Image (cartoon, rainbow, N blue to C red):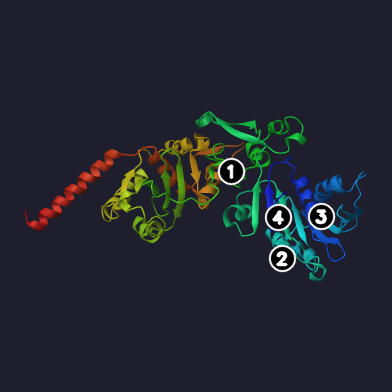
Amino acid sequence: MRARGRNTFIMGPIGSGKTYGSAMRVFDQICEQKPNKSDIRRSRWVAVRNTYPDLKGTTIKDWCDLYHNEEISLGRFNQDFPPTHHLDFDLPDGTRVVAEVVFLALDRPDSVRKLRGLQVTGFWLNEVKELSKAIVDMCDGRHGRYPSAADGGPSWHGMIGDTNAPDTDHWYYELAEEIKPEGWTFLQQPGGVIEKVVGSGSTRKSIWLENPDAENLCNLPDGYYIRQVQGKKDDWIRVNLANLYGNVSTGKPIYGGLWNDLRHVAKHPLVAIPKHQNLMMGFDFGRTPACAIGQLMPNGKLRVIEEIIATGMGIRKFMDEAVLPALKSRYAQFPLKSIQVFGDPAGIAKSGNDENSPIGILIDEYKMDAYPTASNLPERRWEAVNYFLTNDIDGQPAFELSPECKVLRKGFNGGYCFRRINTSGEKYTETADKNSFSHPHDAVQYLAQGAQGEIDHSWRDRHDSERSNRSHLIKDQTTGY
């Protein structure tokens, strides 16, 4: 309501007052338009919805509830195409408001032709996730053209929008969470319910609690949100009631009920803190290697700062072309030998070509302090991450992910999942689906295991002993003794 940036959008659960709030803001800005020489405040707004049934049943209805009904008449409302409210009324300061609010349904990308030639002050995009990006782009190029410069020009112009939570592959998510374009503000309301996970393993399930911080409760029936939980699937509840991004995966999210995007993702990109000389890295090896860089803070919080992902690379090429350049450019204050590395236990297997293992190469050739984790069992690895996801430290989550870790974030939001089995009912595999999210998430799991001290010291001791023996052998051959 107070924002006056160029483009402002708000995401919230159903019943949170988004549509009424947006209508009120449009009206406020109509009254704020600076008067021209004749003391007339002129403006033209276009309210957009994806279909005419939704436009008439929700957008227009809510607007008329506020500004055109039996008790309030601020101007003529034309129900012909396109429906238009012609506002004409006086303000207490002696100025006159003359404005139009035009209601348009733009349900397809080719609907942009309806926008061509429009001279508009601002756009209100109602339930914006239902609109195509092409329509939003066209709207962004049409505002600011009314009133004309000869009539004083607009004192503000731009777009506002409201929406329920979209999926993580939606253009809204990409703009709000990844691109973050200048001049665009994305706001997020508290959810109506909060998810709590109880049990573990096969008995793990989500229970839903009322959120006392939810907005608009005074205008809703008692128990409005918690009553809607009954009979609904968790995925539907997360999007529509808890106001969390959805996922498009057909599988079952591995961290479902534990991951909370709003709580676990940092508001700004994370950077390594130099005074904590404990930079850590988790490695998943193979021809699609992945690395997660993080820090374990003195209070026990695990911060995941960066993800590095590649395809078609062995460990040496991955280090030389991807990992080392990142370390030199963004972590130069951390010497390689001071970085703790935790890797897939399968990384101790030696190659048939040169008798070197990936973890051994990190130790011997790159002088890193590397260890295999104590177990490669998926359950052990997931529990290591779950430990940080489910614990709080001084009221804050013990796990924090940088928003720059885009693949990891989408994986946490459901991309990293158990694959659904093609059979009747909802049945899933007990292993993670091997997809683009699995390798970086394996790396995070090894990082979490290492942060908890779940590492194989005995292998490292044997390796160091063998390396020492090799060193002595080379020395003996060189000196002749």
Outermost residue, left direction?
Answer: 481
The type of residue carrying mark 3 is Cys
Horizontal side of residue 241 vs 305, given as left or right:
right
Outermost residue, front direction?
Answer: 93
Residue at image coords 60%, 56%: 180
The type of residue carrying mark 2 is Gly
Residue 141 image label: 2
Contact, mark 3 vs mark 4 (Cβ under 8 Å)? no
The type of residue carrying mark 1 is Leu
* Place of residue 423 in the rendered image (x, y in percent of width and height, measured from the top left): 59, 39
Distance from Cα at disc 1 to Cα at disc 3: 35 Å
The type of residue carrying mark 4 is Arg
Residue placed under numbered mark 4 in the picture? 4
Q: Nearer the viewer, mark 2 or mark 3?
A: 3
Residue placed under numbered mark 3 in the picture? 31
Residue placed under numbered mark 1 in the picture? 262
